[in-house]
Image (cartoon, rainbow, N blue to C red):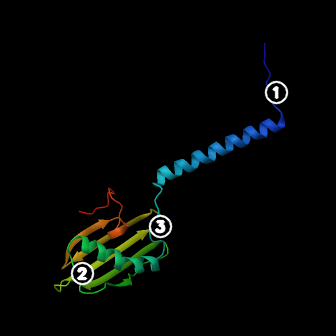
Amino acid sequence: MKTAVKMSRKKAVILGSAVLAVLVLAGGAAFLMLSGGEELKYKSQAALRKALPVTAAAELHQRGVTLAGPLKCADLPGWSKERLRVSCTGTTSDKKPVQVIGSGEKETHKAAYTILVDGRPVVENASCLGADCRSGEANGRG
């Protein structure tokens, strides 16, 4: 014996819409899981150049390093809208040179920061600096 299920056009449209909504939500969730849901904190070269001296100074302060004055920052050769590159320089209060390098990749949503004091790494490839770091984040700060 065959049982035929009859469905009105209205019910079919409602069911189809519900299935489509579920697929869209599932696809969005899968995208966030695969991409990590992260975005770059600084989305432009100008924003990174403006923020880097402040966040780097805060990071150095947290590590007991005092700067003689504000860091001066400039764009590094090879930067683009997709690949952010900034370098900052300055000196410590005891006259040691400081170099900060910050980068960001829009495609991978990865940022990396390195700080050298007197040629020695104080921070290597950290994903954040200073107040930009959330507690418990694995960021290469050591």
Q: Quadrant of residue 119?
A: bottom left
* Residue under the point 41% across and 80% down: 50
Q: Which residue is mark 2?
A: 98
- Residue 126's place in the image compared with 71, above or below, is above
Report the Cα–Cα distance between label 3 and label 1. Answer: 51 Å
| Name of the residue lying farthest toward the left | 94
- Residue 9's place in the image compared with 94, above or below, is above
Q: Return the x and y of residue 46 as percentages of the image width and height.
A: 46, 80
Around disc 3, counting alpha carbons within 10 Å, would you say few (fewer than 14), some (14 to 19), or many (20 or more)? some
Residue contact between numbered discs 3 and 2, judged by CB atoms under 8 Å: no
Amino acid type at image mark 1: Lys
Determine whether, in the image, residue 26 is placed left or right of residue 97.
right
Residue contact between numbered discs 1 and 2, judged by CB atoms under 8 Å: no
Report the Cα–Cα distance between label 3 and label 2. Answer: 27 Å
Determine which of the numbered discs, if any, sits on residue 6 in the image.
1
Amino acid type at image mark 3: Lys
Amino acid type at image mark 2: Val
